[in-house]
Amino acid sequence: MEKNFKRTLITTALPYANGPVHIGHLAGVYVPADIYARYLRLKGEEVIMIGGSDEHGVPITIKAKAEGITPQDVVDRYHKIIKDSFEEFGITFDIYSRTSSEIHKKTASEFFRKLYEKGEFIEKTSEQYYDEQADQFLADRYITGTCPHCGNEKAYGDQCEACGTSLNATDLINPKSAITGNVPVLRETKHWYLPLDKYEPFLRKWILEEHKEWKPNVYGQCKSWLDMGLQPRAVSRDLDWGVPVPVDGADGKVLYVWFDAPIGYISNTIELLPDSWEKWWKSEDTRLVHFIGKDNIVFHCIVFPTMLKADGSYILPDNVPANEFLNLEGDKISTSRNWAVWLHEYLKDFPGKQDVLRYVLTANAPETKDNDFTWKDFQARNNNELVAILGNFVNRAMVLTFKYFEGKVPAAGEFTEYDKQTIADFENVKTEVERYLDQYRFRDALKEAMNLARIGNKYLADTEPWKLAKTDMARVSTIMNISLQIVANLGIAFEPFLPFAAKKMRDFVALHDFNWEELGRTNLLKDGDVLAQPTLLFEKIEDSEIEAQVQKLLDTKKANELKSYKPAEVKEDTSFDDFMKMDIRVGTVLECTKVPKADKLLQFKIDDGMGGRTIVSGIAKYYKPEDLVGKQVCFIANFPTRKLKGIESQGMILSAEDADGRLVVVSPSDLVKAGCQVG
């Protein structure tokens, strides 16, 4: 049954404060949430958008230990970076707070305490790994070992990042403490569990029967979990960083971050609206919408609703429009591998281009399946769509008005049939954009908004006012009036998607009072309204800018390869006498050419200090011949002569194999005389 809501509460997944925000976060959560919040505000609806940093959990303590600082130092640093980046990017939170705040600690403690007193938790004792030297229980991320599935020797106690398999710490082969490197022992510890299985009948009815309108990826993942059968889930853990478990006998235990974090939505609302927060969380006429990525579906559709239901006083989410993942240049985004486009770096590298990234991430949004961000696509969408379609139309309309009507809105005369058809076309845009936004289909909504610019471009191209100006200024006046009305409409249509460009467009035509209901109207501007001098909405992005970003990623990939490089096993022992039989010398390359009909071979003429020699080496794949001329190389001088492609090779040039398999010639760090021995 359709509900009539008076207000909408939007929450966004809390970014984890052990690193900055990247484009995967933006595409999956924050851009669509901001589009939706701006749209509802534009319609005059009562809406708030709640965000904040998730600041508890093991990864933060690991980073703090690695850097020799406190967990609070870590979260303070990244909370500021994330919050400042969101503000500069135009994400319109009504509040962006944090889970280390005193309000949050109080709210989370009271939430736990109420469920505890109602008898909603199960107390269970289990065996967990303990580091005797560090004198503490080990969270899953503090245990490493060999993955039983793929043999990766650096798997964590909760997951192997090499093969992606979820693990229990006890599954690991040869487990070790990440703190001391010692072998941990199993010890008994008591924790509190939320009995998800108790609420399974309720969840099956609420989700599978009452929310069939949810996105297929969300509904499908929930059904899969429910069909497997739910199990009790621990809400506490042994750790010294987090919200302390507020019951007797819980020393050294904190609320598990998955339990603590979503309560942050409530505590942040209390911080924003201390006197009226309950109407947003406890009134049936409030619609609650969670914007999240697919890795958070279970927590927001099954776990958090169970927590709210167990309390009994809260509303449940009306929708959870989760997105899939955004990949980067064909590879999964990874914070640990630094394989990401970080928002704060983007804002520095592309100043004033917030809307370009907002546009690309929306146009390429992973709404129904994983999608891929590439810098080439970023450039193409900017140059071919934002510049060539939207920017081109607005600029032409403004420039022509200044040319023929001194920068004032001209009067419209009698409409032709083509004028009427064009007006009908852009009047329909509101209906289509609105339909898609109401269905959380932001990619399709953006296409419809861009169609309005296409209508404008086609109208100007077909009517050719620059030609009519020679004979029929009355007709030109009508054409430019309609064109400027389209510009004004674009300033409304793009407000949810491209807020910076939308404001520029409205400023161009002095449209200061506006709302969503006016979208599609032909009388937004009055005859004689004075226009502002236009500037370019968007500018072309050059190849050099894109190449710099691609190179940054290539450098990252190279660094990761070097970091993960595992040297070949040391060969069998050899004697000093055998080594001394090798005559290794330094020579200078006089000539270097490719060997005909041999893709891998290069022919060297070497100054060896003894009259010269020829050496053939299989490194053509890694070097251009001209780059080696003049370079000093190490070679084995007493290697037996052998024929390669008819050429007598008098030695062997030494090279090292890099992490990626590339061969690098071995050279002395300083210039030495040709013929010097190495040893």
Image (tube, grey):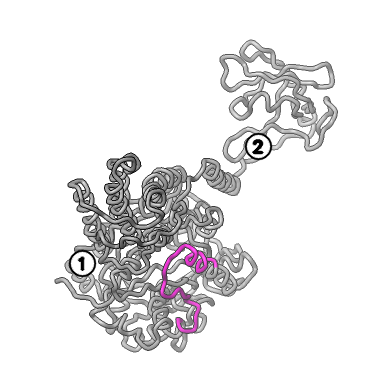
Is 122 placed left or right of 659 in the picture? left
Indicate the position of residue 630 as horizontal and vertical percent values: 75, 26
Callout 2: helix, strand or loop? loop
Do we see residue 672 in this rendering?
Answer: yes
Marks 2/1: CA distance?
A: 63 Å
Q: Amino acid at mark 2?
A: Lys
Q: Residues within 10 Å of mark 2 (few under 14, many from 20)?
A: few
Query: Which type of secondary structure does the marked residue at label 1 adopt?
Result: loop
Left or right, 171 with reference to 604: left
Q: Which residue is mark 2?
A: 571
Disc count in the image? 2
Q: Which residue is label 1 attached to?
A: 211
Identity of the residue furthest to the left in this view? 1
Which residue sits at x=46%, y=71%? 54
Relative to the observer, which residue lies in front, 250 or 23?
23
Magenta-drawn stretch contains 87: yes
* Mark number displayed over residue 638: none
- The residue drawn where x is 36% and y is 72% is 233
Q: What quarter of the picture does the C terminus occupy?
A: top right
313 vs 653, left or right, is: left
Q: Residue 555 at x, y = what percent?
A: 58, 45
Q: Does any portion of residue 367 appear in the rendered image?
A: no
Region of the chain picked out in magenta, as a range:
81-104
Discs 2/1, front: 1
